[in-house]
Amino acid sequence: MVGNKQLLHTENPSLWDIHEKPWEKIGSKTREKLLAAIEKLFPSAERRFCLRHVYDNMKLKHKGDELREAVWCCGKVYNIPKFNRAMEKLKKLNPEAHEWLRRELTDSLTNNLCEVFNSKLDGARDKPIITCLEFIREYLTERIINVHKVLDKCEDSLSTIATTILENNKTEANKVRVLFNGADKYQVTGLWMEQYVVNLKERSCTCRKWDIKECGDPEAWMSKCYWLSTWNAIYQHTIDPINKRSMWPRSDCPTTLLPPKHHKQVGRPKKKRKRVTDKPTQSTTLSRKYLTVTCSKYHNKGHNVGTCKGQGGPSEAGKGSGQKKGKDVVV
């Protein structure tokens, strides 16, 4: 289950013991308090950690832009030799950070499922539980309809994203040199003299990129997860509409349900997620970090109109000097 903090105030193992459905997926950033409950309820389940949140925990002791780039280089490689070389570079850069990372093994860069779901809950996070669940139900209903509209416009056998990936792969394939062995294998040499072996019979490559993404060049070799029919089958289900709350049947449960205990926090409640401080800004967005505030009344820098007392303005600097109001005067 993703978005757990929207429903529970704290990540307490005793609270999480109520989830007894093994098909639910639990996503958590801090995860330390959940591991005990997850291990108890799902003893055979595989547990994976998001690399971005692993780095967020690591940077509490090991910081630096160069170290961050080294960590992401280790996470983005596809084969073991490249990974070992990237880890050796990180070890030379910071041996303590390398030792810390060896105990946090992950094969996922970001938990996009949790991030997307949490971003859609901004309008329901401060609502009661029933209102929150109704918000989620209506959002999922709209999402299914929107996907159906996209599917109706698609004409290829692959999904939109898969088609884009395939076209990019075709463009990159024109830049490599291929040597056929006469059977089922090819020797592929790239521009940077990277050389790998492609096995068409086993549908694999020694670079392991094809093995992991299951996205080759021809459409027939694409994994079924990229097929348009698979995407259509996923969204074949629908969510039934319901009547207004006054028409709901009364529950026969003899237990009186009390409202949860409210923990009042200091300051205004925050809906947006906390962004990491060292996260690089987008290239298309201008950062406000080093901008100087300008007053809209006298157009002087260093303050805004709410705290403006005429400091540096014409009313303060040039009274009786014949200057028009609003024009800058250099003193």
Image: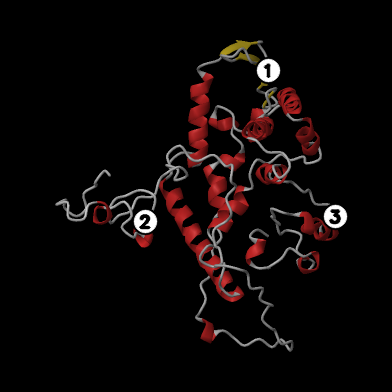
Residue picked out by circle 2? 304
Residue 279 visible in image: yes
Q: Identify residue type, mark 3.
A: Pro
Mark 2 surroundings: few (<14), some (14-19) or many (≥20) residues within 10 A: some
Q: Is residue 278 left or right of residue 281?
A: right
Cα distance in 3D space between marks 2 and 1:
63 Å
Q: Is residue 120 above or below residue 126?
A: above
Q: At 48% across and 53% down in the image, what residue appears?
A: 147
Q: At 59% across and 12% down in the image, what residue appears?
A: 178
Give SS at disc 1: strand
Q: Is residue 177 above or below residue 326?
A: above
Question: On the image, which quarter does residue 287 sit in?
Answer: top left
Choose between 134 and 283: the one closer to the eye. Answer: 283
Query: What is the x, y in percent for residue 14?
Result: 80, 68
Residue picked out by circle 3? 43
Q: Identify residue type, mark 1.
A: Val
Choose between 196 and 13: the one closer to the eye. Answer: 13
- Sequence-wise first label, 1 or 3: 3
Q: At 59% across and 32% down in the image, what residue appears?
A: 215
| CB atoms of marks 3 and 2 within 8 Å | no
Mark 3 surroundings: few (<14), some (14-19) or many (≥20) residues within 10 A: few
Q: Identify residue type, mark 2.
A: Asn
- Sequence-wise first label, 2 or 1: 1
